[in-house]
Amino acid sequence: MPKKMCAASWPPGDGEMARHIRAFDWTATPLGPIETWPPYLRTAVDIVLGSGHAMQLAWGRERTMIYNDAYAPMLGERHPAALGIPFRDAWPEIWDEIEPLVTRVFAGESLRFEAMPLLMTRHGYPENTWWNFSYSPIRDEEGRVAGLLNVTADATGRICAERERDKAVRLQSALLDVLPVGLALTDTEGRVILSNPEWERFVPNKRLLSHDSTSASRRRGWTSDGEPVAPEHFPGARALRGERCVPGIDFLHTDRSGAAIWTNASAVPLRDADGEIVGAVSIIMDVDAETRAKDALRQSEARFRALATAGAISVYRMSADWHFLYQLESSDFLSPVTEPIADWRERYILAEDRDELEAAIDEAIRTRSKFELEHRVRMADGQTGWVLARAIPIFGCDGEITEWLGTGSNITRRKVVEEQLREREAQFPQFADAAPGVLWIRDVDSLRTILSSRASAAIYGYDGAVFDRSLRFWLRMVLPEDRKRVLDNIRRIRAGALVEHEFRIRRADTGDLRWIRNVDFPLVDSAGNVWALAGIGLDVTAAKQANERQQMLVAELQHRTRNLMTIVHALADRIGRDSTDLADFRTRFGDWLSALARIHGLLSRLESGSRITFDELIRAELDAMSADMGRTTLSGPGNVRLRSSTVQTLALALHELATNAVKYGALGQAPGRLAITWSLEPKASGSPWLHIDWRESGVVMPSGLPNGAGKGRDLITGALPYQLGARTSHVLTPDGVHCKISIPVSASTLQAVAPS
């Protein structure tokens, strides 16, 4: 049995936890009264309380908590309530993680952990913590594990500090990576200590180019005098000598691919606390786009200046509000300006023209669009001249106008010519307006209309009030497919050629298509120089249409003649075989020729595009037979238009029916009656059909006349279906002939047909 001890004196010491343990009521715990604790437990408690390291015991089957003063702060608000309670109740939020470890220790295993992360609630809120600790078993007198000794150290502060340091390193690295300039720190030998990718792009060898003889040739720079910059005067070398090379030197860098890139390199010395040079800070910027843009601008300005001095134009720059004239480069006709001036209006513009100029400027500023105006100017020689001024706005990054860039063309000569022409114009209109065609004159340079006769508006169909003298206005009326040829001819005229050509236009008012025939020629001065283009234009639409109609009529005549000869040949052959003698042939053939003559008489009276109608055809045939209309009935719609290709064959069939009716049938016998009816049947697709019904009645048929014999029936039942695609029937009834004919007719019939 363990020897009892005095509870009031053990454990000894004035420490906080020694006092708590002495004062604690251990009888309510599985450990029992403190005076009954075994020696190995008391020894373990003495070791824990005597240590300056944070220690904790978990004793017995309930893993009862005993800890020292160094461990108490780790418990936070749970101290001192954690004394004497089970391990799991002291740390409930991490018990699931540490219980397997505790079980392993009570099984006799020792464990050690470094920076183990645990989410703990020590001060009323969860917090991430990291711990270095060891779990060791404590055995009783018989060697059984009676408890667990936890020697621990809170690593949270160290881990957080390391993470903050790593975060700062990553942030520094990220900042260096995204810097738009190259940055490097070097030692006194030019070796790189720290650099970013942009710097390494130009210095891949990690050494200042001034200290790297193998790479120094990749960088070429020049002084203001045009002398090459030697490596010993590169910015890095100067910084290591204590000089500040800011803002730097422009170098043309050649990379490994051979591409040339403009850069700006600068450097400053890096000093320690005693002011001694310990290295250099090197900065390299890619200024290729900016440098090349500046160079392009210089070249552009040089070209503008050359253009202005080589020709009769000026190039100028104006402030956004047109208050200042920044620059004016000009040939001899205007005085140049190299410094901004505010009195440019007084210097160049005539007083009586300034209001018009100001109105045009205000409109251009208001609409933020192109300025254009023809106005008078004071020229360099003191004379008054004319200029065509144009300017466009230049916009800044914010979308606002920063300045205006413009040109001025010397149009004095053109204006003088126009004035001379106006003086002559008083006599010209009487001649020009009496001419049936258009008389016009255009300026050779601008191609603007200087003069145009009254017939121009009548032929082209525009209102004089909206007449635009530009070539573009006139060219819009020319058909697109004719414009290239028209422009090519204008170029030929400007070169001195006389050109006769035809083209098509659409009238500005109605859009009607018209044909124009132009005879165009250059006007030259006494020196033989072309100063204007002139021409005479005629509307030849009617002549074109007459010619087209004539060609169409000739083609139609040829077609009809071929058809007629075919029919005459066939008739002569058929009638010759059926005739008894020459007299019989003459009579029969004459009848057929008369019928053909009537058909062609109808065809020859037609207007272009017209058609013979069925009612015209049947009445013409009956009139030729002197038919008794009192015994004849006609019933059907009027204006049933027949195709030209069907008229001759259908007319011959009707002639055969009428001839037989006079000889043998209804038109030759007093009691006989003839009823001719026709109707029109529309079709959902294709041409409509004409149905003709020829019915004779009250006829005594001659004996011996066979049903179906004769050339008339052959024509109806054979030729019509073959040539016209007709459907026919021909029957000799006891009362007379009954014939049906159905043929396709002109599609336009449906719009033109009249009631019966």
Image: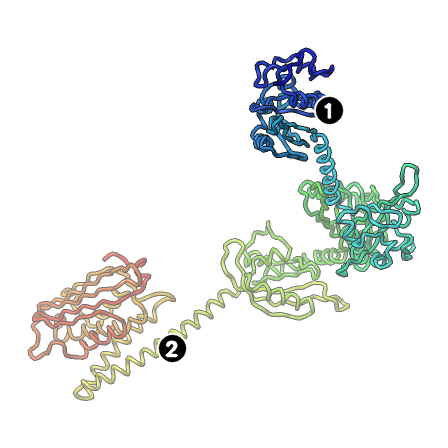
**Whole-percent x and y of residue 435?**
58, 62
Residue type of the residue flagged with mark 2: Gln
In the picture, the disc for residue 176 is: none
Question: Is 383 situated left or right of 693 in this image?
Answer: right
Q: Between disc 1 and disc 2, whose residue precedes?
A: 1
Q: Is residue 314 visible?
A: no
Q: Determine whether label 1 and label 2 are within 8 Å by CB.
A: no
Q: Nearer the viewer, residue 329 or 743?
A: 329
Q: Nearer the viewer, residue 630 or 138?
A: 138
Q: Nearer the viewer, residue 744 or 666?
A: 744
**Whole-percent x and y of residue 620?**
24, 69
- Foreground mark, 1 or 2? 1
Q: Determine whether 623 is above or below 755 in the image.
A: below
Q: Residue furthest bottom?
A: 581
Question: Is 664 situated left or right of 36 in this image?
Answer: left
What kind of element bears circle 2? Answer: helix
Q: Determine whether 745 is above or below 164 in the image.
A: below
Q: Is residue 299 visible?
A: yes
Q: Residue at x 77, y 68 (%)?
A: 527
Question: Is 649 situated left or right of 176 in this image?
Answer: left
Question: Where the C terminus falls, by quadrant?
Answer: bottom left
Q: Which residue is mark 2?
A: 558
Q: Which residue is mark 1?
A: 51
Mark 2 closeness class: few <14, some 14–19, many ≥20 residues within 10 Å = few
